């Protein structure tokens, strides 16, 4: 009889104990703000560091992604394909003759961001030779001209 009483009292106490609610699920991280190309508008003095080389050029950016221009000294102007994704701008250029490897065609892919008033990002270059393609990675930095 004591066992039945003990079991019944335990069941009543368990039923009367307040339930602990589960904490709410964590909030998803805030989405990165969308980059506005107008924020990049202007002429930029750019430097690319790839392999052991440094390449200097200017980039003219506008709010219209179809009118951007890259000017490498002693070369014809190039129009990159410009796209935006969240806080990043992607620039795809080429094929054109490589500055780093003269006589070899290259295509480049830059992913850049506006950080503290500077354009900064990464570069991937694909050189196309008759025997094989090769890939190089580097970084880009730019400051807007006043």
Image: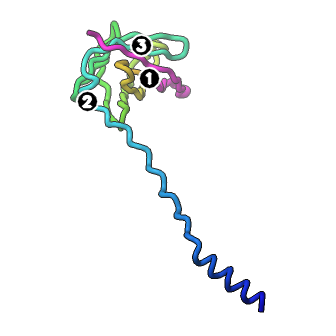
Q: Are marks 3 and 1 in contact (CB under 8 Å)?
A: no
Q: In this view, does 33 lie to the left or right of 136?
A: left
Residue placed under numbered mark 2 in the picture:
65
Between marks 3 and 2, how big is the CA–CA gap? Answer: 21 Å
Q: In which quarter of the image is residue 14?
A: bottom right
Q: For the point 52% across and 64% down, which residue is it?
A: 21
Q: For the point 30% across and 20% down, which residue is it?
A: 78
Q: Is the C terminus in the top left, top right, bottom left or bottom right quadrant?
A: top left
- Closer to viewer: mark 3 or mark 1: 3
Between marks 2 and 1, how big is the CA–CA gap? Answer: 22 Å
Residue placed under numbered mark 3 in the picture:
47
Between marks 3 and 1, how big is the CA–CA gap? Answer: 17 Å
The disc label shown at residue 106, or none: 1
Q: For the point 37% across and 18% down, which residue is it?
A: 118
Q: In this view, does 1 lie to the left or right of 139?
A: right
| Residue 144 falls within the magenta-colored stretch | yes
Q: Position of residue 31 (x, y in %)?
A: 38, 42
Which residues fall within the magenta stretch? Answer: 121-146
Check disc 2 and report its element: helix, strand or loop: helix
| Residue 16 falls within the magenta-colored stretch | no
């Amino acid at each position: 009889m004591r066992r039945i009483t003990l079991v019944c009292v335990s069941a009543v106490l368990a039923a009367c104990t307040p339930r602990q609610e589960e904490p709410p699920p964590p909030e998803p991280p805030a989405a990165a703000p969308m980059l506005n190309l107008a924020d990049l508008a202007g002429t930029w003095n750019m430097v690319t560091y790839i392999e052991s080389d440094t390449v200097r050029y200017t980039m003219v950016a506008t709010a219209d992604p179809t009118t951007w221009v890259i000017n490498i000294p002693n070369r014809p102007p190039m129009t990159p394909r410009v796209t935006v994704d969240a806080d990043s701008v992607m620039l795809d250029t080429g094929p054109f003759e490589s500055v780093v490897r003269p006589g070899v065609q290259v295509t480049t892919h830059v992913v850049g961001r506006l950080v503290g008033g500077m354009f900064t990002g990464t570069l991937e270059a694909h050189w196309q030779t008759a025997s094989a393609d090769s890939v190089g990675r580097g970084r880009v930095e730019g400051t807007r001209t006043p």
